[in-house]
Image (cartoon, rainbow, N blue to C red):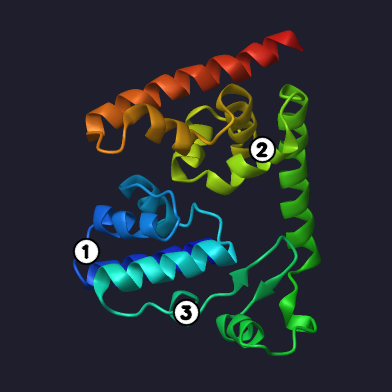
Amino acid sequence: MELSEVIGANARAHRKRHSMTLDEVAKVARSHGLRWTSSRTGDFESGRVSSTIGTVVAACMAYSEATGDPLTVSAVLATQDQLDLTPELSLTSDRLKEILAGGDPTPLAGDTKGTDEIRKSVASSANAFRQAATRFPDVDIRTLKDVEDNSGLATSRLAADLETSVQMINAASASLWNRSVEDERDSRAGEHATPQRRGHVMRTLKSELRQAIRGRDGDD
């Protein structure tokens, strides 16, 4: 199971136990340096936000402060499933906690995925990245990295709707706006936008992305 999905699910369960809204958590999260709206908080809870150490620690602080009940890093890592950290590395929750607590990180036999699983995952990701790079060769790699770090559920949904890869959506977003779909949506819609307004903005972004991607198709 993806690490971000486990962390997000545990954070969501903690929030719901205390009957807090996404917006209430988002407001506190912003005070800890996270550029979160209620939608972005939902993306985090759905596992669509990159689980960097800084983000996870800041999120735990935000959820703890918002609910008045500590949400520890150990708690958000709790799961019975294997945690997928990279295409090759998969750890149990206890093993990851042990390493983060200062334990020996020397790889063990059970820490790696099977050869076939690794090969399929890497091949699929590499192929999608190559296609995106071919379509949008002008995109700065640092901008693309920032877009990837800030992309979430909206990006994944657009990729499915447009029948393309997340990598392609991120590359197109970087080319068009120099930021992720989520950040561009929030900027255009405004912080306190209604669901109707956000939906209208997303339809506009979808149209712009479709035109950019298909336009590049036509140039080939």
Which of disc 3 and disc 1 is earlier in sequence? Answer: 1
Q: Would you place residue 64 above or below residue 208 in this image?
A: below
Q: Is residue 21 left or right of residue 158?
A: left
Could you tell me the amino acid type at mark 3? Answer: Ala
For residue 144, which numbered disc appears in the image? 2
- Residue drawn at x 22%, y 63% is 20
> Which quadrant of the rendered structure holds the N terminus?
bottom right
> Can you tell which quarter of the image residue 70 is in?
bottom left
- CB atoms at circles 2 and 1 under 8 Å apart? no
Q: CA distance from mark 1 to mark 3?
A: 21 Å
Badge 2 crowding class, 10 Å Cα cut-off, few under 14, some 14 to 19, many 20 or more, is many
Q: Amino acid at mark 1?
A: Met
Nearest the camera: 209 or 121? Answer: 209
On screen, 105 above or below 22?
A: below
* Tag in front: 3 or 2: 2
Q: Quadrant of residue 127?
A: top right
Give the residue drawn at x 45%, y 56%.
Answer: 33
How far, Cα to Cα, is label 3 from label 2?
Answer: 31 Å
Mark 2 to mark 1 CA distance (whole Å): 34 Å
Q: Please name the residue that numbered disc 1 is placed on.
A: 20
Name the residue at 65% across, 66% down. 85
Label 3: few (<14), some (14–19) or many (≥20) C-alpha neighbours in 10 Å: some
| x and y percentages locating residue 60 in the rendered image | 42, 70
